[in-house]
């Protein structure tokens, strides 16, 4: 049996912030949450089946997603490995009876990250070196991903399936052969957005504001490469630290609205609403024709700030926008509701809600995809993980048939994905909703040759703003009333 004590839930400050303050966790991170007689103190890559550790984030800017990510992994095992959740109202209680090809999957611990590299290294070491994990799913955030990839590189018998960490470096630069990412990075998620704004909205000059850490850099890099690639100009790049509470000095560094055609935002976590409110105070009202953002620029946030933001365009994420409802997506969401009675996920303010509410968003889905990858990898080796390198080779060759589209891996074991672009709109009930506008198919981490292991990592000054040929320019697949026009 796999059972973990549930952290105390966090009450979120507002639905608009999306990923908000810290959820309670196992205190100082030094306890596995397992009963003492079930704890393991030695690492074993063979003979004991899969001993799984999940790296969540129960503190820091994205602490509100702790329940979501553990639930994502659990749903994959419930659907494809016979697992049963130990609680009908919380995924953090763990699961039982997961097995693939005769090989059991035992949950040995859940790591409590806080968005810092030091903390996530403490947690992965505890799970691997004290609890005996031979497979890790996670982590959640950008700097954490780089740290865990570097750690994995020194533990070749360990296999890591990244959760939803969006920094580019963890696969393109670190290149650990035992580290796998079955989703896109932050740059990929903005593929096609700059092209759309340039061609369809007439934007020519843009200012960028993004969190000053690896994911913010990567997300901004994708937009900059895309917008400049078709001929646009980025006039300013402003990078407030993640977790900033007073954004006024950073907003002051942005040009006034009469100096640019628009602004691109990649400020996330607890900062999204605060940054936008600071903009309103300093620069005037938000209007959709002048603003675009990455996935944190969402309907809940817009609803809190007013309907004038309708028309703003949004980059993609691990899932396609919610108005795209294929039979596979509907089946996936229904499976979540069949697995638990309720889940206190981030999008419901960490209050009980239908599990499909959390399953529809990318944090849950990234960890779900990792769980499916583990199951399919085990099937590919008939459950035999006694040779970790053979298991890892099988995982590297997988193409996953997932609800939001197939995902295969590039040579650096990072996902090649379809990106769904959307915009905010006002529906008949005067509510701000997200509607799909286009799908950019098959984007890989090199971003049409923009990035490579030899280029600098995305940062405050890289990539340069220069015209370049990108494979998807002018070729995005339109979406009409939630139906891709393939």
Image: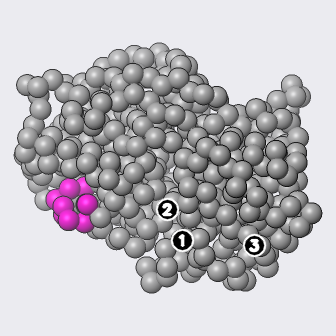
Q: Write down the residue under mark 1.
A: 458
Instruction: Specify the segment rendered in magenta.
Output: 151-159
**At numbered mark 2, what does the secondary structure look like: helix, strand or loop?**
helix
Q: Does the magenta portion include 442? A: no
Contact check, label 1 and label 2, Cβ < 8 Å: yes
Mark 1 and mark 2 lie on one chain; the one further toward the N terminus is 2
Pointer 1 local density, CA inside 10 Å: few below 14, some 14–19, many at least 20 = many
Contact check, label 2 and label 3, Cβ < 8 Å: no
- Per the rendering, the mark at residue 214 is 2
x 75%, y 46%: residue: 278
x 60%, y 37%: residue: 18
Q: Write down the residue under mark 3.
A: 234
Q: Can residue 376 be seen in this view?
A: no
Q: Quadrant of the N terminus?
A: top left
| Residue 483 placement (x, y as % from top left) | 74, 46
Q: Which of 368 and 398 is in front in this view?
A: 368
Image quadrant assignment for residue 347: top right
Image quadrant assignment for residue 380: bottom left
């Amino acid at each position: 049996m796999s059972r973990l004590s549930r952290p105390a839930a966090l009450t979120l400050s507002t639905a608009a912030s999306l990923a908000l303050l810290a959820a309670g966790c196992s205190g100082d991170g030094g306890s596995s949450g397992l009963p003492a007689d079930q704890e393991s103190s030695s690492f074993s890559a063979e003979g004991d089946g899969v001993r799984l550790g999940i790296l969540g984030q129960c503190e820091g800017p994205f602490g509100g997603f702790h329940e979501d990510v553990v639930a994502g992994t659990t749903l994959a095992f419930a659907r494809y490995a016979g697992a049963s959740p130990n609680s009908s109202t919380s995924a953090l209680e763990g699961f039982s009876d997961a097995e693939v090809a005769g090989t059991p999957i035992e949950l040995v611990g859940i790591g409590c990250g806080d968005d810092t590299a030091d903390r996530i290294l403490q947690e992965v070491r505890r799970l691997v070196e004290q609890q005996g994990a031979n497979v890790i799913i996670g982590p959640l955030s950008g700097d954490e991903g780089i740290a865990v990839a570097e750690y994995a590189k020194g533990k070749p018998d360990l296999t890591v399936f990244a959760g939803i960490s969006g920094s580019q470096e963890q696969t393109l630069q670190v290149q650990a052969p035992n580290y796998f990412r079955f989703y896109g990075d932050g740059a990929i998620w903005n593929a096609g957005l700059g092209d759309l704004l340039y061609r369809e909205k007439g934007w020519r000059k843009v200012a960028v504001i993004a969190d000053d850490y690896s994911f913010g850099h990567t997300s901004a890099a994708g937009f900059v490469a895309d917008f400049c690639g078709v001929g646009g100009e980025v006039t300013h790049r402003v990078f407030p630290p993640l977790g900033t509470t007073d954004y006024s000095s950073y907003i002051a560094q942005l040009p006034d609205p009469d100096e640019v055609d628009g602004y691109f935002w990649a400020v996330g976590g607890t900062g999204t609403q605060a940054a936008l409110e600071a903009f309103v105070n300093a620069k005037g009202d938000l209007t959709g024709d002048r603003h675009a953002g990455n996935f944190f620029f969402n309907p809940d946030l817009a609803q809190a700030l007013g309907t004038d933001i309708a028309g703003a365009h949004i980059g993609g994420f691990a899932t396609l926008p919610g108005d795209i409802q294929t039979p596979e997506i509907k089946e996936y969401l229904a499976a979540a509701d069949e697995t638990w009675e309720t889940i206190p996920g981030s999008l419901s303010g960490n209050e009980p809600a239908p599990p499909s509410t959390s399953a529809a968003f990318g944090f849950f889905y990234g960890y779900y995809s990792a769980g499916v990858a583990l199951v399919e990898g085990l099937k590919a080796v008939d459950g035999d993980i006694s040779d970790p390198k053979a298991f890892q080779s099988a995982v590297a060759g997988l193409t996953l048939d997932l609800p939001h589209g197939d995902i295969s891996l590039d040579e650096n074991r990072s996902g090649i994905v379809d990106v769904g672009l959307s915009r905010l709109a006002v529906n008949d009930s005067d509510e701000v909703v997200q509607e799909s506008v286009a799908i950019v198919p098959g984007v890989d981490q090199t971003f049409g040759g923009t990035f490579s292991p030899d280029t600098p990592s995305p940062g405050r000054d890289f990539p340069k703003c220069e015209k370049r040929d990108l494979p998807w320019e002018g070729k995005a697949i339109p979406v009409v009333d939630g139906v891709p026009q393939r």
